Image: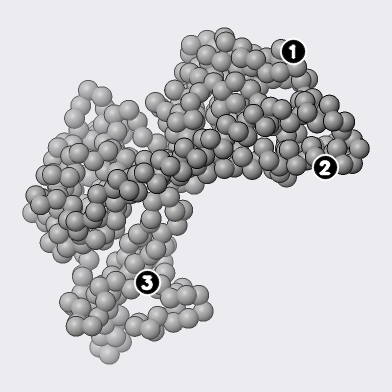
């Protein structure tokens, strides 16, 4: 049985002689779509730009963010067109079929694997809430600076100040970053391991592993299709000639995938061998002077979001809400919510503790996991300001992190409750 050559071809292609061929005019629009998304980082902006340029959508109408999202996810852009993804039920409604029953039709790729991986990563981060939209004029603190009126402050292209579009409150970018870096430098001296963990992940490692996982998934699909063809021969539904026609493109794709997988595995192994040994120090010179300026924007943004929850700006005043603050913050330049670090840890006491497993008690505080969460997470009951300090340490590539509770802060809070009861 030959590959299906009926029905609508994916946008950017046309049927030719029973196979998918590139429709150069539409393919150019499809490639532009990926470039625009990497530039603007929003599907709505891509749709609006394509409409302004006068390009018709696949239905000859206006582009929408839904259509853009579907085409950004469609793997025909990298040479794999997936068909038979849905089936009609008895009531006539179409429902999704299991992924291992889909069929694939090879086609010429329109974009590189690197571009595809970059776009899929941004889409996944946005759908999971891990990533905030980053504009072309983004700053490490973008998205964290809020006006006292409630608006998020941005940096207009003509200014070097975070500005509120509603009440026009402003704060100089240089001043705000200077305050942030002063606190960050102090924090790095007190918690070097935590900062080192944020810096140790090389984004290229994640990209290589994502590429390898994608190649292995494609190999599995190709092998599954070949196995399905073999079963059809055994069931008498395929002749030898049909099986040859069916598997020839799959075998070609499979050989290519195996070669790419070997290359990707060798590249990952080579990066591990070439990585310099850990020295235990980010640099012999101060962190904010020697390390921070050379970090990629995304790394600086990740560190800023780990350290700071938000900046609140009002005329003549700046309040910083730290996720966990250094012991000596830059109080001469800003104020912050009262956060008593509590008594110093006694010998043998930990600096941080973790949440106990569900159904068990914390061995130090005697509290349950639910009671501790009430103290460390913002909730309506604590007016979104938890009384006990904690932070989440997430390994690169992991969807969830480990919540670490500052023991001195928890101890101080519990002692305060005991004092209130006795007074």
Q: Which residue is mark 3?
A: 354
> Which of disc 2 and disc 1 is earlier in sequence?
1
Q: Looking at the picture, does residue 212 appear above or below residue 38?
A: below
- Left or right: 266 in relation to 287: right
Marks 3 and 1 sit apart, C-alpha to C-alpha, by: 63 Å
Residue 108 rendering spot, x and y as whole percentages: 60, 20
Q: Secondary structure at mark 3?
A: strand
Q: Residues within 10 Å of mark 3 (few under 14, many from 20)?
A: some
Q: Secondary structure at mark 2?
A: helix
Of labels 1 and 2, the one closer to you: 2
Q: Which residue is mark 2?
A: 231
Q: Residue at x 45, y 31 (%)?
A: 114
Q: Nearer the viewer, residue 217 or 240?
A: 240
Where residue 77 sits, quadrant-wise, is: top right
Q: Residue at x 19, y 44 (%)?
A: 292
What label does residue 17 carry, if any? 1
């Amino acid at each position: 049985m030959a590959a299906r050559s009926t029905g609508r071809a994916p946008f950017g292609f046309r049927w030719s002689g029973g196979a998918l061929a590139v429709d150069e005019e539409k393919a150019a629009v499809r490639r532009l779509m990926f470039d625009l998304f990497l530039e603007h980082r929003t599907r709505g902006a891509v749709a609006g730009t394509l409409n302004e340029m006068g390009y018709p959508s696949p239905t000859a109408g206006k582009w929408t963010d839904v259509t853009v999202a579907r085409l950004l996810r469609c793997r025909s852009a990298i040479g794999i067109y997936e068909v038979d993804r849905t089936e009609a039920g008895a009531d006539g409604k179409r429902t999704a079929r299991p992924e291992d029953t889909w069929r694939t039709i090879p086609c010429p790729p329109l974009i590189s694997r690197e571009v595809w991986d970059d776009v899929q990563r941004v889409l996944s981060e946005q759908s999971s809430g891990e990533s905030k939209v980053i504009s072309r004029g983004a700053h490490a603190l973008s998205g964290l600076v809020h006006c006292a009126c409630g608006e998020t402050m941005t940096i207009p292209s003509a200014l070097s100040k975070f500005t509120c579009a509603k009440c026009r409150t402003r704060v100089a970018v240089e001043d705000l970053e200077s305050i942030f870096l002063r606190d960050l430098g102090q924090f790095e001296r007190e918690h070097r391991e935590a900062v080192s963990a944020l810096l140790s992940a090389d984004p290229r490692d994640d990209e290589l592993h994502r590429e390898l996982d994608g190649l292995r998934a494609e190999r599995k699909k190709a092998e599954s299709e070949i196995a399905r063809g073999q079963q059809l021969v055994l069931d008498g539904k395929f002749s030898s000639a049909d099986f040859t026609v069916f598997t020839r493109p799959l075998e070609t794709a499979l050989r290519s995938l195996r070669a790419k997988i070997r290359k990707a595995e060798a590249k990952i192994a080579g990066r591990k061998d070439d990585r310099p040994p850990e020295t235990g120090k980010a640099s012999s010179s101060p962190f904010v002077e020697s390390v921070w300026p050379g970090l990629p924007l995304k790394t600086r943004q990740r560190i800023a979001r780990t350290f700071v929850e938000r900046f609140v700006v009002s005329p003549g005043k700046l309040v910083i809400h730290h996720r966990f603050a250094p012991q000596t913050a830059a109080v001469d330049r800003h104020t912050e919510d009262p956060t008593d670090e509590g008594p110093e840890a006694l010998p043998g006491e930990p600096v941080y503790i973790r949440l106990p497993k569900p159904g068990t008690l914390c061995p130090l505080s005697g509290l349950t996991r639910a009671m501790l969460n009430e103290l460390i997470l913002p909730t309506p009951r604590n007016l979104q300001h938890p009384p006990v300090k904690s932070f989440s340490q997430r390994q690169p590539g992991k969807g969830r992190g480990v919540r670490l509770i500052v023991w001195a802060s928890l101890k101080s809070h519990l002692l305060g409750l005991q004092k209130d009861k006795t007074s």
